[in-house]
Image: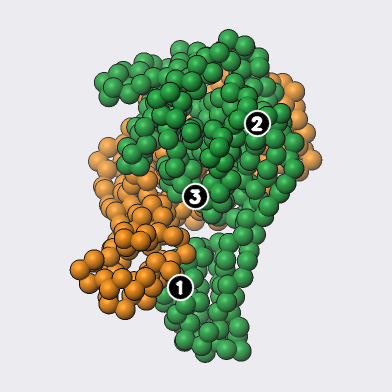
Chain colours: A orange, B green
Amino acid sequence: MAKQIVIVSGKGGTGKTVISGAFSTIAKNKVIVDADVDAADLFLLLNPTNSKVTKFSGGKKAVIDLGKCVKCEKCKNNCHFDAIDEDFIIDEIQCEGCGLCAGICLSGAISMIPVDSGEWYISETVYGIFVHAKLGIAEENSGKLVSLVKQKAIEIAKANKSDWIIIDGPPGIGCPAIAALGHTDCVVVVTEPTLSGFHDAKRVIELANHFKLLVKVIINKCDLNQLITEEIERYCIDNQIEVVGKIKYDETVIQSIVNGQTLMDYQVFGQKDVLLNAWNKIVAAIN
Amino acid sequence: MIIAIASCKGGTGKTTLAVSLALSIGKNIQLIDSDVEEPNDHIFIKPQINKKENVLIKVPKVDLNKCTFCGKCSSVCAFNAIAVTPCSVNIFPELCHSCGACEYFCPTKAISEVDQVIGVIEIGAKEEIDFIQGKLDVGQAMPTPIVKALKKYIDQSKHTIIDAPPGSSCAMVNSVNDADYCILVTEPTPFGLNDLIIAIEVLRKLKIPFGVVINRSDIGDNKVEEYCQNQEIEILMMIPFSRRIAEGYSRGEPLIESFLEYREKFKNLFMMLKDRYG
């Protein structure tokens, strides 16, 4: 079975996507997943083509037929989300699609309509098959969409006998992050030596520990604050977590993004060996 | 006036902006950190926390003496949070949205709702700034109930700054949807632009006026600026990259304390927004 490696960080903007891009270039025989469906950016480095698009409906929303409504207020009084107002208009944002109102409506005036919550894609890239998605505007259920793209990637990996699934994860520790890191073989936490980066990394490491997953750490921009980098390293030693790579602050990283290239493909980037070593350490730890 | 600070992409400078704005105003202001998965404002504000309140959600509890394992609860649950077998009921609290459907429809009244703690709201102050933050417990999946609970602390007699979480789904939407104005922070890279466009689509759907701050404005390319000009979106401020700003940030120093020239800029920004939208 393909081994799953997820790249997370807790805090956003620490370098998850560029490192996912680099690992997507290094790893052989893999499927690549962008599980940050709220703000999917990995496609900007992988330049996918021939995308097969599928609509995603993560849930339903209640719709009231005011012609049938007898204004008994049962729906309004029982809605746990205060989503129905005095005029029996449903607040689309507040409605979670539970269907309680439709189930209790005496006049059958409420129906549950599937919502268009975004779409997902299976694309080709020069690095291999890429599964990604785009959440609909202001839609919920991003956790479900993350689970879906992961599931598709697992199916493709099985059919193609792939060795690896590389997953670019979302920030945070809530449902999309849980969905992204669940059942993976290694959680790579990308952090930076800032008090907030370290604070957030500890929370996502705690989350990975909660699910008893293997954790590796990469410290990005490690020379930005030497003291905090040392503090992160001490924390990792105390918690028996291997730091698999330390990347120095490097302006060419931004240029590689502007060029739409992965770090490994970007000629000028001078720390390819660090990423290669990090990858080899992760592979060694999993095997 | 309620000003939300948002960005679909993480790490563009939401915290820097929210903290700078709050500190530059100084009084009659509350700062609400609504990034409950990873709240960071406290690192920069260093508030004194005076009160903590647990955030509870309702989850179902089944009285097996009354349960007939009919499976009704499972069939009405839109979130797959209950599975019923011929002799057991399994509840998955992390999937439960606390809608109450299972309790309502249970024919034998075997289900009751019980409280479950999912996080905490911390209330404090730093000098004359009211500080409120939400914090999701590690392992809990749903930030939105905490975001909603935080909004009950909005004090209409004061100005409120809400530091929203990254992303574009439920927690972000609920953080910004009562704001009079939203400041979007981005960086001039293809990632920053791609995510800015998503954030703009969300705000347009919610009909919230907004403007853009371009952080690290001299890195990357000029496509964000071009996009804003073409779309007639106001660019509120440009903050050029400086290693000293980044280092100050790393140590938890608020921008306007290390770089005094920004104090005036943020004050002016606030006065301008207050005149127009307050």
The chain that hosts pointer 2 is B
The chain that hosts pointer 3 is A
User: Which residue is pictured at 28% across the width and 68% down the height?
Assistant: A111
Same-chain check, marks 2 and 1: yes
Extreme residue toward the front, this view: B157
Please indicate whether residue A126 sits to the left or right of residue B64 in the image.
left
Q: Quadrant of residue A108?
A: bottom left
Same-chain check, marks 1 and 3: no
Q: Crowding near pointer 3: few (<14 within 10 Å), some, many (20+)?
A: many
Identify the image quadrant of the C terminus of chain B: top left
Please indicate whether residue A233 sits to the left or right of residue A56 in the image.
right
Q: Secondary structure at mark 3?
A: helix
Q: Secondary structure at mark 2?
A: strand
User: Which residue is pictured at 40% across the width and 38% down the height?
Assistant: A40
Q: Is residue A241 above or below residue A180?
A: above
User: Which residue is pictured at 43% across the width and 23% down the height?
Assistant: B275
Mark 2 vs mark 1: give the one in front: 2
Q: Which residue is mark 3?
A: A176
Q: Quadrant of residue B193?
A: top left
Q: Which residue is mark 2?
A: B129
Q: CA distance from mark 2 to mark 1?
A: 41 Å
Q: CA distance from mark 3 to mark 2?
A: 33 Å
What x and y, as percent, mark residue B107?
A: 47, 86
Q: Which amino acid type is marked by label 3?
A: Pro
Q: CA distance from mark 1 to mark 3?
A: 24 Å
Q: Decide: marks 3, 2 in contact (CB < 8 A)?
A: no
Same-chain check, marks 3 and 2: no
What x and y, as percent, mark residue A119?
A: 31, 49
In this view of the protein, can residue B86 be seen by the observer? no
Mark 1 vs mark 3: give the one in front: 1
